[in-house]
Amino acid sequence: DEVAIRDALIEDNASPKDMDDTLAEYKARRPRADPDQLVIGSDQILALKGAVFSKPTSRSDAAAHLQQLSGQTHHL
């Protein structure tokens, strides 16, 4: 489960780059209907001053994210 992996990485103080790499690899290794398919795993992590942002779950959550990010330099 991607959320559980992300939460465990946050708890372990993993860097956003390590989180991104781990989640991308997890996605690439998931079983596929056709094992001969070429799979490219990717992910992205939004970080601001060491805090990692998850996908907003509501409009108000999205607005709060935008307010925190406004005028700040963040990393994706």
Image (cartoon, grey):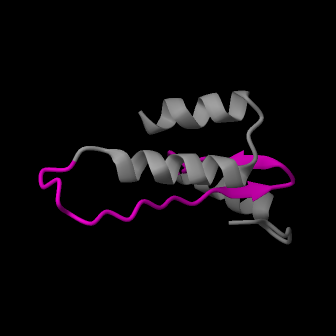
Give the quadrant of the N terminus: top left
Query: Is residue 60 at least partly visible in the picture?
Result: no
Residue 30: image location, x then y, percent = 31, 44
Query: On the image, which quarter does residue 45 sit in?
Result: bottom right
- Please report the residue visible at 20 percent of the width from the left and 63 percent of the height from the top: 37
Query: Is residue 32 at least partly visible in the picture?
Result: yes
Question: Is 31 drawn above or below residue 35 in the view shown?
Answer: above
Residue 64: image location, x then y, percent = 69, 52
- Please report the residue visible at 84 percent of the width from the left and 70 percent of the height from the top: 73
Magenta stretch: dominant secondary structure:
loop
Residue 16: image location, x then y, percent = 71, 51
**Magenta residue check for 57:** yes
| The one of 26 and 61 positioned closer to us in this rendering | 26
Query: On the image, which quarter does residue 44 sit in?
Result: bottom right
| The one of 70 and 25 positioned closer to us in this rendering | 25
Q: Give the range drawn in magenta.
A: 32-58
Give the quadrant of the C terminus: bottom right
Residue 31 lies left or right of residue 55; in this view the side is left
Residue 35: image location, x then y, percent = 17, 53
Q: Residue furthest front?
A: 36
**Magenta residue check for 43:** yes
How many labels sit on residues? 0
- Please report the residue visible at 70 percent of the width from the left and 62 percent of the height from the top: 66
Residue 14 lies left or right of residue 35; in this view the side is right
- Please report the residue visible at 49 percent of the width from the left and 54 percent of the height from the top: 24
Query: On the image, which quarter does residue 65 sit in?
Result: bottom right
